[in-house]
Amino acid sequence: MNRKLLLALQKRNKARLEELRGKLEKNEVREEDLESVQTEVDVLTQEQQDIADTLANMPEEGDEGEGEDRSGDDDKDDKDEDDDDEEDEERKKGISQEQRDKVLGAIGKGLSTRGHKSTKTKENEIRSAFANYIVGNIDDKEARSLGLVSGNGAVTVPDFMAKEIITYAQEENFLRRLGTRVTTKENIKYPVLVKKAEAQGHKEERTTDMPETDIEFDVIELEPTEFDALATVTKKLLARTGLPIEQIVMDELKKAYVRKEIQYMTHGNETDNVNDGALSKKAIEFTPTGTVDLTSGQSLYDALVEMKNTPVKEIRKKARWVLNTAALTAIEKMKTDDGFPLLRPLDAPVEGCNYKLLGYLVEEEDAIDGADPSVPVFYFGDFKQFRIQDVIGSLEVQKLVELFSRTNRVGFRIWNLLDAQLVYSPFEPPIYKYEITPDTP
């Protein structure tokens, strides 16, 4: 079959799918006809996909044309069917919204198939539809017909766009990059040892019962809770259609989401965003045996050596330093009494790190700053023990118009289900924290 005939058949199928969509939206499909309509939609959708695949593998022609238009005959047949429907009006039974949405979604899939468009182009179409929905350019029905899941003023972020947000979060949030992420809809339980067994030694053959020792475990459960962030965009910016509004909206949402996520995972101390498993709360406070004087490189060096050797050997094998800028500044300009620099620059970056301190990689992150950014903060340990759970398909966006109407802005609330905690047994703390305040030894 040549390209012109394929395009003509594609056009006819599209017209029929659009006609069926119109009937569904006007509630003109009877319950007893729903199965046949669903079957026809499935057949047309598969045919559209087959045509699209064939066209994609065919060489481009100078004049694609629109093919032979046979819509007149189709219209005639459709009119006859409409007449039959009118005669059977008394037998018409409404179908449920769920049934209607299911068929509309299948129709949207068939209509979105284009033989000459790549997967990237299709993603851009969905991205544009998503942005147009959340800024109010299309309604719920149109959004559903284009394959978006929407309802109650919110829309689920398409999978490929959700991955972009999480990827961006991973680039900006060091705990996502260094920690362990799990994607599931189920709660995750981590057993941790809280009481060890004890062994006995005896030279003589045992004549009494062996003493019993208990092994006890506790369970730390990641139980995702609601997590959201808010971004606002000016109406003036959204009205300028020459700009890529979908990119503007997504960029703002990414930034707002990541700022909130970093705060939740690192500190978790906001009134409405408390996380008892946050890094700063669960990491073990380190206290050196001697007094540390920031004007003395040797005293700081001794304290860091002691801190480095505090975790058990199994933890040290996988450990690294995470410092804020104040801590990095403190050690960059200090040397031991014999002139040895505390910080050793690497010839080339390793895992994004430019330095080693006492043989371990050093990462600089201002997200760990406390109330005073000038206070040096040191973390050392295995950050893989920081566990993050994302719930599949939970990322959602809601448009807020009235809330910001006085300032001519539109708000976008991004909502997710998330939990993140530092999980460990009291016998093997994986991360230690050392904050050198004026009152710290």
Image: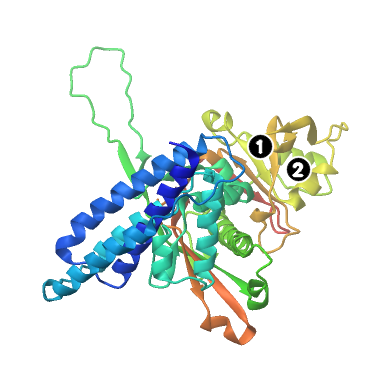
Identified by mark 2, the residue type is Leu
Residue at horizontal 43 percent and vertical 55 percent from the top: 69
- Crowding around mark 2 (Cα neighbors within 10 Å: few <14, some 14 to 19, many 20+) is many
Residue at horizontal 59 percent and vertical 36 percent from the top: 310
Label 2, label 1: how many angstroms apart (C-alpha)?
10 Å
Percent x, y of residue 251: 63, 60
Residue at horizontal 63 percent and vertical 50 percent from the top: 172
State whether residue 207 is above or below residue 394.
Answer: above
Please, what secondary structure does the residue beneath circle 1 have? helix
Please, what secondary structure does the residue beneath circle 2 have? helix
Identified by mark 1, the residue type is Glu
Describe residue 7's horizontal placement relative to residue 196 as left or right.
right
Which disc, if any, is residue 306? 1
Percent x, y of residue 353: 71, 37
Q: Residue furthest left?
A: 91
- Would you name the residue on which mark 2 appears? 300
